[in-house]
Amino acid sequence: MSDIAVRVEHLSKLYRLGEQRARYSTFRETLAGAASAPLRWLKGERRAEPNTIWALDDVSFEVKHGEAVGIIGRNGAGKSTLLKVLSRITKPTRGRVDIYGRVGSLLEVGTGFHPELTGRENIYLNGAILGMSRREIQRKFDEIVDFAEIEKFLDTPVKFYSSGMYVRLAFAVAAHLEPEILVVDEVLAVGDAEFQKKCLGKMGDVAQEGRTVLFVSHNMAAVRNLCLNGLLLSDGAIQIRGKISEIISHYLNSSHGQDLNKFFLESEEIRLVSLKIFQENYNNQIFMTDHPLNIEYEYEIKKKVINGLRIGFDLITPESVIVFRTFDDDLINHSVRKQGLYKSICTIPPNFFLGSDYYILPRIGIHNNKWISDNDTRIKITFDHILGVNQNYADHRPGIIMPALKWNTH
């Protein structure tokens, strides 16, 4: 056989949404559909049914043996669906996939585990599913247990494991039972930072041993360090493929965040012209923790004079905890402003964010008692969790933010 490990040809996957399943076709509709299907097939038509979505749309690519390929894209781009098809978990609607080698998959927490079986029993079960003999599994058994760090719970049913323990054991099994092709989804995000580094190191070893790795992740630094080539998916189709550095650059510099133009505000005193959240040299909504972040309001004061206007925002965690609130008059008095166009820009310093999701809640008010902004409008901002890039930190830090504070040691 050639050096091809994975060949994907015109792969498409159609999903029907929930309400479509509840509807049953009449006998007349079934006959009509059967009669017209050959004609639609000859014409190459894809029927655009309501309540359906093409998770994958005519995807074609090849992966060579020993190649580490990063697959990136926004949520809903089709990454996980692609891996499920490659792992034979779900069938494609159209197209074909040829796999040349034994596949080890880590797609979701506990995939392939039986909850009533112990960790020890699940190791042997997974090995058998991969086609390995008992002797081969025994040869790798101690390495798997050491890597997963679950020796105390080895004979406990996995239904009592935490999500972190599940991931540690699942990854250890998938990586150590010597599959020719290792398929890994974003599930590594469940583990702690120490274990993530350990897993990335192991995947690097697997790739160096000449085995094939397909890696889906939002961790751009991890993808860059592990993979040489990549695919960028968008709306179920391949948008670009090639060298991973070029793929990541294209992804980070493309505008794929929320459309802030939809944030509209106007009152008798003020009209918001634009609200921008950006980093210099980037045009995206996946931000870098080691770059300053800018929040820019451009607005028009409609009255001849306005007194007590405050432009600001709350920074909020996904759990609705307010990290801080800031206004443009905190340090400089802007209480009296004349009619005209203004810009108010707040810059949050680098090495401040922990590396996760936050929300900006715009706050525009007068005299702190008349709020003009909609207090239900939250704008999500996402940070790339960079492992090993930020040299200010050698470990993972708890907390809501992670500022690089100045110390003076005598």
Image (spheres, rainbow, N blue to C red):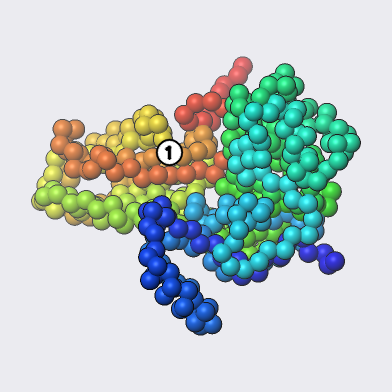
Please state, as top left, top right, bottom left or bottom right, where the C terminus lies in the image.
Answer: top right
Determine the residue located farthest toward the front in the rendered image.
27
Badge 1 amino acid: Tyr
Q: Residue at x 57, y 47 (%)?
A: 218
Residue 169 lies, in percent from the top left, at 70, 32
Give the number of marks. 1
Q: Residue at x 78, y 59 (%)?
A: 100
Picture quadrant of residue 290: top right
Along the line of sight, the residue nearer the viewer: 232 or 294: 232
Residue 77 lies, in percent from the top left, at 51, 57
Please state, as top left, top right, bottom left or bottom right, where the N terminus lies in the image.
Answer: bottom right
Along the line of sight, the residue nearer the viewer: 145 or 114: 114
Task: Please give left or right for residue 327 compared with residue 384 in the image.
Answer: left
Per the image, the residue denoted by label 1 is 358
Residue 291 lies, in percent from the top left, at 52, 44
Along the line of sight, the residue nearer the viewer: 123 or 347: 123
Q: Residue at x 63, y 36 (%)?
A: 110
Q: Residue at x 71, y 28 (%)?
A: 119
Inspect this view and state whether residue 175 appears. no
Task: Please give left or right for residue 9 compared with residue 323 in the image.
Answer: right
Determine the residue located farthest toward the top in the rendered image.
410
Residue 6 lies, in percent from the top left, at 73, 61
Inspect this view and state whether residue 384 appears. yes
Q: Secondary structure at mark 1?
A: strand
Along the line of sight, the residue nearer the viewer: 268 or 108: 108
